[in-house]
Every structure is written in structure tokens, then in C-alpha cells.
Image (tube, rainbow, N blue to C red):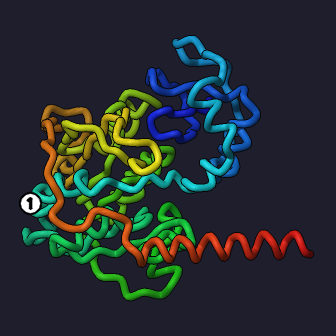
Amino acid sequence: MRLYYDADSEGLFWDEFNNDPFTQDVTDEPRFRAAAKAQGLIEPKNISEVISVYPNPPATGVANAIISSYKKWERKPADLYPTPVDGTESIIEVLKAMKRPDGTPIKTIWEPACGDGRLARVLEWHGFTVISTDLREYPGYGYGGLDFLTETPGAKWGWDMPEIDAIVSNPPFSLAEEFIRRALTFTPNVVMLLKQTFWNVGGRSKGLWVDHTPDLELKLTWRLAFLKSERGNSPLMDCMWNVWNGDNAKHQWPGSDRQCVTEPLPRKKYPGYGGIGVKPALQVLEGEIDALTKALSGLLE
């Protein structure tokens, strides 16, 4: 395993092999290793020798700029990159066409990495019932403090959970495969926002693809400006929605009956409010004040 830095998302992740030209192998950089631990990434026991077929340039340019300001890591805990509303709006028609096992349209959606709620609010605007949770205690929307990979609202909080018709999310880039596998244990209807290079790296085309071939791969025809207010409107990342609806799950691999339909996804304008909103902003502020209070208390002890 090696540690990689993604210049598109400014995120870190451990992977067996990565040949994406927008990523940089930073395994031998102690500062990046420390940043990865600060983000909660578990360092593997076995660190491989250099695997990438691309030369590994020194950590300069964008990467060095990130290191120089540790606050950048703090502002984006748990791979927090809120989904621009046009990205969610463009998948709505697909969601409206998805069915429950009894053939009726899906209604209740779980968004397990809701962040400030920009994805969930679009779903709600279109009439879906959305259960919004997030790993962080103060996500800015929904209910914080739930680890989707190991917990459920019912087990942790005693909720009388309704039947989940679908799980729709923009998962942390570093945990996308884990989110997909976990989501499919709850419902056959799963929709995840991924990088278009997702299936090219990490052996996913032989592992996850074989285990859970998506039914649809909808490639966005524009680039999402995840952090427009901070970095301007010149995004670099090509994204896609991968959709699982249970059709391919009916067929064993290998076999010719499995099909993943790939289509371009045109951009649609969201008719509602696309900003963060006052309530989510206040909840994030509450979390920052709470974290500062705890930090000050630690210094005084």
C-alpha cells in the first residue's frame, strides 16, 4: 500500500496502485503521513516499495501549498467536499425511475455522508424523504456522530428506522469502495458520486466490479466546482454517478447477462437555493466553538 495525494480533491488516500496523473505518491513525505493520520486514515501495516509507473516529483506546487497551511486539512475533515446542487439535480430523473422490490417508486433515501446537506436538500425539494447522517458531530445538517461503515441509527440511537429504499451519497473519496459495499447490504438501490477514474485504480475492476457491477455509469458532461468559494470556478475533476438497481445482482459473474450502461449525463439547473443556508452554517460554527472549547480546556488541565 502507498499513500497518494489527489490534486483534484486535495485529499489523501491509501491504495495498492494508482496511475492517475492527477495523483502524487507522497508515502515518503512525513508531513503527508501526519496529515493522513489527522484525517483519521488508518496507516496500513505493510508499506510497499514505489509502485507508480510515473516519476514521483518532489512535493512542490499545489501539494506544498497544502502542507504550508494545516488549516486546510481542518476545514475539510472526513473528505468534506459538498456536492454542488447541479450535480444532484441532474440525477433526479434517474432516482424517480428507481423502484422498490414491490415495483413502486422509491421514497425513503439515506444520505450517510450528508455534510452541510446540499445533496440531501435537493432530494427533499423533489419530494423524497431523506435520512441525513454524517460521521462528524456537527456536520451542518441532519444528525452527526454516526459512522456509516460500522453503525446504524437504529442500533446507536434506538430509532425505529423506516425501510430504506435507496442510499444516495457523495462518499469520502478515500472510502468510496467501503461505502458502496456497505450501502449494498441495506438496499439494492445505491447511487454514488465517484471520480471518473474510480474503476481504473486499486484493483477495483477485478474486485468490486466483479462483486458488484453497477447497472448504470452516468458521466457528468461538466466538472463539479466542489469548493467554488475557496478555489474559484475552474474545477479539474471529472465525476460520474454510478447506479446500482439490483438488475446485475441477479446474475453470477462471469456471465454475459451483466451489463453496465454508460451514458453522458447532461447538466441541469436546480430551481431551489444552492447555497449552504443559515442553519447549516450555524451548526458548523457551533461545532467549531465546541472543538475550540475542548482544546482550550485541554491546555488548562
Query: Where 70 sits versus 20, above or below?
Result: below
Residue for point 48% across, 55% down:
80
Examine the rendering and report whether any part of residue 216 can be seen.
yes
Q: Position of residue 23 (x, y in %)?
A: 50, 27
In depth, the one of 190 and 120 nearer the eye is 120
> Quick one: SS at disc 1?
helix
In depth, the one of 91 and 101 nearer the eye is 91
The quadrant holding residue 129 is bottom left
Q: Position of residue 239 (x, y in %)?
A: 30, 39
Examine the rendering and report whether any part of residue 1 can be seen.
no
Point out the residue furthest to the right here.
301
Residue for point 71% across, 38% down:
33
10 Å neighbourhood of mark 1: few (<14), some, or many (≥20)?
Answer: few
Quadrant position of the C terminus in the picture? bottom right
Residue annotated with mark 1: 97
Q: Position of residue 110 (x, y in %)?
A: 33, 69
Question: Seen in the image, is 68 located left or right of residue 226?
Answer: right
Q: Position of residue 153 (x, y in %)?
A: 45, 78
Tell me the amino acid under the disc marked 1. Ala
Residue for point 24% across, 74% down:
108
The quadrant holding residue 162 is bottom left
Question: Seen in the image, is 271 located left or right of residue 22?
Answer: left
